[in-house]
Image (cartoon, rainbow, N blue to C red):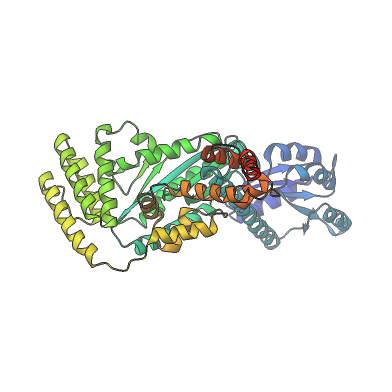
């Protein structure tokens, strides 16, 4: 917290400073001004979180300082320092929107109460601002608004960004995985509250591909913001240790720094593309994306095949599972796999499928075990009956709620499965991605609404879930092949024939 003390009496400033230091306030920085003119310069330069200001001062009094600067510092809290003889001035300050004052001499108890109140108000304000930042960032990344039109949030416009994507690999039941993932996401949210502030924003949400992501943003000119975001990402590594196990692996890949906002999808896409390499790089670790770049290019297809094997195992699709085992046999025979890579591969397969491979065993023995595992899976699949069709349930929910800002994480939580599992299953069952399905559903409904000539295009866009008319028009044109207005004219002309 950055605090500015404005008072022409040295002893008052020194006393306040001493008491503030006794209160053990986190990241406390104290600045002093001896008169109103000096205060104006410091207020503009430092933009403090909290100001203690005396009423009666030379050059400019406290009320004049407040009048000149309060509007340009909306996030700064003000506390009037006043004596009984100056109480009428304190009432004048109330008209300027300054509600807090302390009577001189200030006691440490009164000061502590005032600080606690301000810290709570600041925390509430920054969390509310951060929610707005997170919602706008989600809309940008999920394609509900375009980068150019997102002008309402300066944090999106001016910030540098850093993100981490979490990849979960586990052989536990989906309900158990979902419960643990929700607990981790909640813990991550609580952790973020310690670092959100005037110069730092943090978003936590689920990508349309099902992975959990966290994004930190800070203004390049605000060093404290960068420190807060770096500290947040460092603390994530400690948090992960409480959730990792041999049966529940969370691998984190962190992006390089990016700026401006329209570049953020590039590092995210790069991380998703590189993510299969976690199998040979090592799961249950925290990696930076540049460590993955140009690493083991010859093993990329092998890693993708192992991920596909895991998916078919989860789906209990025996025929396709056994086909991939055959593909793996061919890959393995054509590659040189050193002991470290072999150990990492075994760790992944054991964590995600509970296949009990040993790094000490031969690769031929691995293939034999995987085939035996497939036979066991076939027996298990035949015993399962009356399982609910998750994709039918998901599609039903989308059809009823497409006009809202829904994501795969929200639907996965309702169905008690992980977003990543639902995303993979959705694509396999429908032949399209979750995001494309929602987009096509919205455009289909928009075509119906355009039949009504009284509805404006902007109104149609908002009705189906798009706040940006330009972005809606762009998507409509890509899918339908003409502008919404042209589509309406075509309908009108056809009806006249």
x%, y% of residue 74?
72, 47
x%, y% of residue 354?
23, 57
Residue 91, image quadrant: bottom right
Which residue occupies the extreme top position in the image? 294
x%, y% of residue 232?
48, 47
| Vertical order, 224 against 416 (above or below) | above
x%, y% of residue 228?
53, 45
**Relative depth, front residue between 282 and 297:** 297
Q: Which residue is located at x 39 percent, y 55 percent?
A: 422
Which residue occupies the extreme front position in the image? 497
Q: Which residue is located at x 85 percent, y 39 percent?
A: 59
Q: Is residue 444 left or right of residue 368?
A: right
**Relative depth, front residue between 108 and 357:** 357
Q: Is residue 60 left or right of residue 144?
A: right
Image quarter of the C terminus: top right
| Vertical order, 110 against 423 (above or below) | below
Q: Which residue is located at x 56 percent, y 38 percent?
A: 477
Kindly tell me whether residue 385 is visible in this rendering. yes
Kindly tell me whether residue 183 is visible in this rendering. no
Q: Is residue 354 left or right of residue 494?
A: left
**Relative depth, front residue between 482 and 158:** 482
**What number of labels is visible?**
0
């Amino acid at each position: 917290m950055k605090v500015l003390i404005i008072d022409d009496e040295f002893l008052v400033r020194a006393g306040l400073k001493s008491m503030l230091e006794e209160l053990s306030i986190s990241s406390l920085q104290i600045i002093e001004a001896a008169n109103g003119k000096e205060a104006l310069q410091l207020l503009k330069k430092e933009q403090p979180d909290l100001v203690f200001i005396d009423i009666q001062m030379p050059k400019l009094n406290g009320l004049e300082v407040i009048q000149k600067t309060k509007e340009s510092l909306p996030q700064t809290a003000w506390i009037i320092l006043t004596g009984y003889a100056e109480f009428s001035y304190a009432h004048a300050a109330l008209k300027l929107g300054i509600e807090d004052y302390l009577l001189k001499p200030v006691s440490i108890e009164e000061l502590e109460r005032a600080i606690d109140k301000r810290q709570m108000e600041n925390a509430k304000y920054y969390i509310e601002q951060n929610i707005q930042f997170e919602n706008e960032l989600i809309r940008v990344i999920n394609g509900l608004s375009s980068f150019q039109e997102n002008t309402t949030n300066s944090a999106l416009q001016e910030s540098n960004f850093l993100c981490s994507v979490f990849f979960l690999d586990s052989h536990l039941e989906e309900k158990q995985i979902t419960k643990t993932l929700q607990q981790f996401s909640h813990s991550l949210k609580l952790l973020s509250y310690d670092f959100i502030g005037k110069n730092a924003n943090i978003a936590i949400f689920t990508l349309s591909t099902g992975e959990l992501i966290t994004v930190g943003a800070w203004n390049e000119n605000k060093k404290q913001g960068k420190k807060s975001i770096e500290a947040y990402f460092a603390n994530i590594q400690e948090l992960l240790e409480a959730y990792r196990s041999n049966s529940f692996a969370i691998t984190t890949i962190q992006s390089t720094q990016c700026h401006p906002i329209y570049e953020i999808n590039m590092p995210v896409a790069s991380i998703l593309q590189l993510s299969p390499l976690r199998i040979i790089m090592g799961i249950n670790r925290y990696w930076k994306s540049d460590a993955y770049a140009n690493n083991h290019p010859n093993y990329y297809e092998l890693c993708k095949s192992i991920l596909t094997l895991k998916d078919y195992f989860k789906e209990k699709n025996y025929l396709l599972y056994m086909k991939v085992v055959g593909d793996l046999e061919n890959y393995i025979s054509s590659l040189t796999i050193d002991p470290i890579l072999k150990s990492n591969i075994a760790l992944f397969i054991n964590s995600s499928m509970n296949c009990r491979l040993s790094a000490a065993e031969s690769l031929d023995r691995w293939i034999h075990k995987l085939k035996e595992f497939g036979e066991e899976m076939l027996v298990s699949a035949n015993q399962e009956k009356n399982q609910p069709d998750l994709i039918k349930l998901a599609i039903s929910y989308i059809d009823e709620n497409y006009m809202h800002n829904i994501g795969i994480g929200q639907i996965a939580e309702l169905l008690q499965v992980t977003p990543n599992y639902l995303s993979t299953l959705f694509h396999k069952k429908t032949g399209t991605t979750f995001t494309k399905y929602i987009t096509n559903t919205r455009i289909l409904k928009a075509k119906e609404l355009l039949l009504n000539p009284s509805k404006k295009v902007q109104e149609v866009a908002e009705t189906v879930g798009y706040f940006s008319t330009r972005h809606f028009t762009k998507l409509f044109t890509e899918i339908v092949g003409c502008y919404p207005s042209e589509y309406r004219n075509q309908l009108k002309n056809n009806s006249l024939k």
